[in-house]
Image (tube, helix red, strand yellow):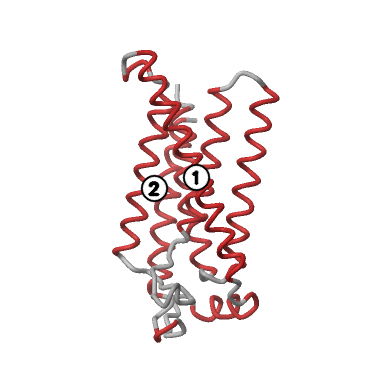
Amino acid sequence: MKLKKSVISIGLIVISIIYILLVKCIDVASIGPNSSSVGFSHINELFHNIFGYNPSIYKITEVLGYLAILVVLIYACIGIYQLIKRKSLKKVDKEIIILGIFYVIVICLYVFFEKVIINYRPVLIDGVLEASFPSSHTLLAIFVCGSGVIINNKLFKDFNYKKMVNILLLVLLFLIVIGRLISGVHWLSDIIGGVLIACTLLYIFNYIINKK
């Protein structure tokens, strides 16, 4: 079982890398603002023309993104509380420490894709052409909320409380991803990239914390 999960983890990483390369190389055309080049241009342009740009939904997803960051801070505070109370990093729940490491990985990926441009946005934000791939809100929402659901099953004993928190996390995840999808500030391939990378991290995270 461990070997199988390890193979799946490696497979997901490889698939993510291949997808990134395909977006960078396949069907590239200058369909973006300021004639910026976009991979998978035909399907991306078709999808963008269907939904267009909705600044109201965009602003809502920006606010919801701050809620996802708040979730990160809550788990960080739980870790800090455990560290202070137990007076040793070794006594902090391993799930919290591993979660913190994955948060750092997510931040590193964000910085990486800000420097290594795969696609630019289909619209200018405040007159500026910004990096668009992968959708950082999608990546953040899926990993933060998904990992929250996973870790809550280990942190909290009260079933009703745990269920309520998990439902709120899943609702937040859904609203951010769907909102980002139809807001028009990302190409379809950006959303798919965010989903793929986040699910890869989520699978590996779940595998590690449940590894005996």
Task: Work out how far the residue at label 2 is from the one at label 1, CA to CA, in angstroms.
Answer: 9 Å
Residue at the image position 63 percent from the left and 53 percent from the top: 175
Residue at the image position 51 percent from the left and 46 percent from the top: 68
Residue at the image position 41 percent from the left and 19 percent from the top: 82
Three-letter amino acid code at disc 1? Phe
Q: Give how far across and how far down residue 120 sits, in percent.
A: 41, 73
Task: Name the residue tied to disc 1.
Answer: 143
Three-letter amino acid code at disc 2? Val
Between 196 and 151, the residue placed more toward the observer is 151
In the image, is residue 24 above or below residue 161?
Answer: below
In the image, is residue 141 above or below residue 155?
Answer: below
Between 168 and 43, the residue placed more toward the observer is 168
Q: Are marks 2 and 1 in contact (CB under 8 Å)?
A: yes
Q: For mark 1, give the secondary structure.
A: helix
Q: Residue furthest right?
A: 160
Task: Name the residue tied to disc 2.
Answer: 106
Q: Give how far across and how far down residue 33 sits, in percent.
A: 44, 82
Q: Give how far across and how far down residue 39 sits, in percent.
A: 44, 75
Q: For mark 2, give the secondary structure.
A: helix
In the image, is residue 58 above or below residue 97?
Answer: below
